[in-house]
Amino acid sequence: MKQKKENTTEKLKIGLYGISGCAGCLLTVIYEDCFTEINELVDIKAFPLIKEDNYKGPLDYCFIEGTVCFDEDIITLKKLRKRSKYIVALGACSHVGGVPSMKNFLNKDKVMRFVYPKYNHLKSTNPTPINKHIKVDYYLPQCPPSKKEILEFVQAITSNRPFRLTEDPVCFECRKKGNPCLLNQGQLCLGPITRGGCDALCPTNDTICYGCRGPCPDANIHAFKELLKEKGYTQKELVAKMQTFAGLQFKEFEEEKSTWLEK
Amino acid sequence: MQKIIKINSLNEFLTNLIKDYTVIAPVKERTTKFKAILDPKQIYLDKITKIPLKKFFLPEEELLLAFKENKITEVRPKTKPTIIFGARKCDLNAINVLDKVMKDPNYMHRRKNTILIGMYCTHPDKYCFCESMELINFYDLFFYPYNGHYYISIGSKKGEALVKHLPSAKKEITLKFKNTKKIKNKDIAADYQNTIWETDANKCLSCSACTVVCPTCNCFDIKDKSLINKKQGRRTRSSASCQLKSFSRVAGGKAFRDSRLSRFKHFVYHKIVYFKNRHKIYMCVGCGRCLRACPTHIDWTKTINILSKTKKIQKK
Ligand code: SF4
Ligand code: SF4
Ligand code: SF4
């Protein structure tokens, strides 16, 4: 009994928080496949989604889900940053802006009216990923993030192994699986310009890749755009597709302003 | 001396083989590939398979060894004697290429356990250029369809044993291959610095499709994974691709083949120059899979032909 207690004190202190988001990423963590092992490896000190009593002290790793959509989100982020040694962006919203970030490319007020026709007191802002406001140490991409990758991350931090995202595009995993290529069939699949690591989940299920893991560090977006033009797609169609999840990052990537990619 | 069998007796011949062997043949499912069949009716010979035959000899995520506590077990494949039926001349020559470089026990086990039966292809498509690649006869048996019969060439004792009950053919029938596509001059060693390659490389998405579908690309990555308690773990092998930056990434983070251009040229030069210098045969067997799969329709064989054209003009 005594021994057990000593072990617990050595475990890394983890917090799992969400800002504006759908809670889907946090929910992914508590799936049976990975939660049992995560719970054994680390000490989950704070997890407001599933815990009533939450520790308020310093954390080793703090996982954050969601996009920055309100000023309150920034306040929450800054507080979490101060409390934590490492910040982990959990899921596409936190990593690249996710679906809400689409609004950056649309008429803000129109979008707000469309979603909330009645509420006049709301202030519509430009949703941004968390690294626009605080320093982020690790990213766990995808919408929702992959259980396998979350577990691998926790295994890595608890055994002092480095954690790296793959730098290969989705196509590599997709081709290795022997999937018929959707792009070659004329569909607008973003696989060649998107970072892999998802086991080509969408194309394997006959759905195009929407780029939810953000740009692949080696993406040849210029050639990709030329190709789709040849295939008869308009610039607007292509850009709209790229803006589904990671429009901001694709844009920065093309303007070569992106600093977060080599992480 | 060739053996002969009626075309409509082929299914019976194969059904008998299926009783004693695992028979792998081209099939059409979500995609076209080689797969173990239970009924000869599954066989699909109309078009070249999208997925190459190498997947049978070099499976993805192949388990090589596993350890538990202090005990290490090397994992060896357990394959029943296998017959590959319906491989094309290019598919068979690709195995010849793999034989030159793959020497590990798992590969050797599968190779030794396998009988290769080839089939003449009546429908080469506009991407096929096998005739340009100096292919050899590499098979245990090879079938030529002619006048309602298959004329079967015998390439080995193993093959002979399978057809000894069949009658001998009165005349020898071998058919020519009918490619429309050709590589004219494969002597490109001096053109490495030619800027012509940039046009192709600028179009390249570095998607890896060409290397994954190529029947002779054999580079692999070995991954060790241990459970968190470090008491159990496994080592697997899966394919790698020279078109990806990660391929040449070393400790410390440097990638030696950083530019898309150098990666693209490496593919072409390995297939046409480097391998030939070392092993006396081309690494490319002219199956055209890389050209069919490339999403941006890069055709490096055309580029080579442009090179030889410009050279001729220079000579004049
Ligand atoms: S389906 Fe999409 S991800 Fe798969 S190979 Fe084609 S372009 Fe790449
Ligand atoms: S390089 Fe292309 S044509 Fe040559 S063997 Fe490979 S896939 Fe076939
Ligand atoms: S298939 Fe085409 S685009 Fe993809 S890596 Fe090969 S040459 Fe480049």
Image (cartoon, rainbow, N blue to C red):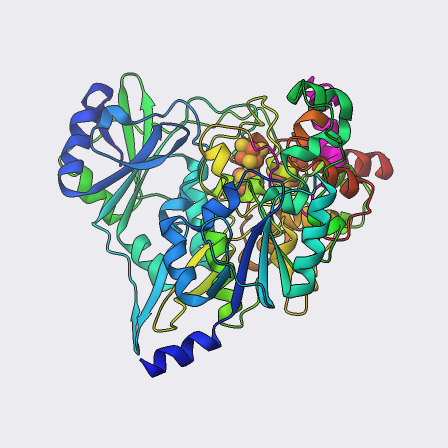
Q: Quadrant of the C terminus of chain B?
A: top right
Which residue is located at x 65 percent, y 47 percent?
Answer: A95
For residue A218, say whether it is visible.
Answer: no
When the figure is inspected, residue B241 is found, relative to residue A116, above or below; the finding is: below
B48, above or below B247, in the image: above
Q: Is residue B141 visible?
A: yes
- Left or right of A146, for residue B64: left
- Residue B3 appears at what percent x and percent y? 23, 32
Give coordinates of residue A155: x percent, y percent. Answer: 47, 64
Q: Nearer the viewer, residue B252 or B258?
A: B252
Residue A236 on the magenta segment: yes
Ligand 1 is found in the corner quadrant, namely top right
Place residue B307 in its image quadrant.
Answer: top right
Residue A16, image x, y percentages? 54, 55
The boundaries of the magenta stretch are A209-237
From what the image shows, is residue B82 above or below residue A46? above
**Residue at left offset 61%, top offset 43%:** A66
Residue A177, quarter of picture:
top left
How many numbered badges does the structure rendering display?
0
In the image, is B16 to the left or to the right of B307? Answer: left
Q: Is residue B78 left or right of residue B187?
A: left
Tell which of B275 and B132 is nearer to you.
B275
Image x and y of residue A131, in percent: 72, 51
Q: Is residue B165 magenta?
A: no
- Residue appearing at x 52%, y 67% in the figure: A13
Q: Which quarter of the rendering shows the N terminus of chain B? A: top left
